[in-house]
Amino acid sequence: MAAPLTDILMIGAADYGLTGQLVWPDAVLMNNYLSEHPETVKGCSVIEFGSGIGITGILCSRFCKVAVLTDHNDEVLEIINKIIEMQSCANAVLTAEKLEWGNHDHISNIIKKHPVGFDVVLGADICFQQSSISCLFDTVGKN
Ligand SMILES: C[S@@+](CC[C@H](N)C(=O)[O-])C[C@H]1O[C@@H](n2cnc3c(N)ncnc32)[C@H](O)[C@@H]1O
């Protein structure tokens, strides 16, 4: 029997870490845009913030040359890595990295691997907590 909606809402409300395990409407909008305008990322190096299970970064990897999907949640990263393993159409070098916005160790680890930075920084549905916004912009500035 399916779980009642109230139970599902309570599970979601109990753990913010689960947010990345859903595909959010903004990711669908972003993917529609990128499908119609692949030139936005064609040949570029792209980093995605708060990628969740990564549908945007994965789509980019069809067109760009480097795609790095990032999230701060370990369970989400485990899912992203499994999804990356299943990709056979990626044109890009496609990887996942742990990145908590504002975390200098995470940022330096990524910069060490990508010293020239990225051409495009993407994020779908990631501006939802006032407290994270300055960390998020600080992190964008360093990439
Ligand atoms: C609403 S979900 C959006 C997921 C995906 N981009 C989408 O649109 O389907 C927000 C994502 O941001 C991640 N996130 C939230 N706060 C974060 C933080 N401080 N640092 C890094 N990632 C964060 C969550 O783990 C989650 O995957």
Image: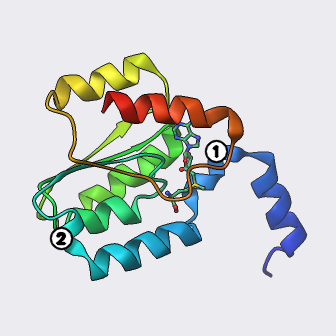
Label 1 lies in ligand 1 vicinity (Cβ under 8 Å):
yes
Circle 1/circle 2 CB separation < 8 Å: no
Provide residue 60's location: percent of width, then percent of height. 26, 64
Mark 1 — residue? Answer: 17
Q: Is residue 87 visible?
A: no
Q: Quadrant of the C terminus?
A: top left
Does 57 appear above or below 133?
below
Q: Residue at x 48, y 74 (%)?
A: 28
Expressed as whole percent of the image width and height from the top left, the position of residue 20 reads 56, 54
Q: On screen, 26 above or below 137?
A: below
Q: Quadrant of residue 129?
A: top right
The colour scheme of the drawn protein is rainbow
Q: CA distance from mark 1 to mark 2?
A: 33 Å
The amino acid pointed to by label 1 is: Gly
What residue type is disc 2 on? Answer: Glu
Say the numbered circle drawn on residue 39.
2
Labelled disc at residue 63: none
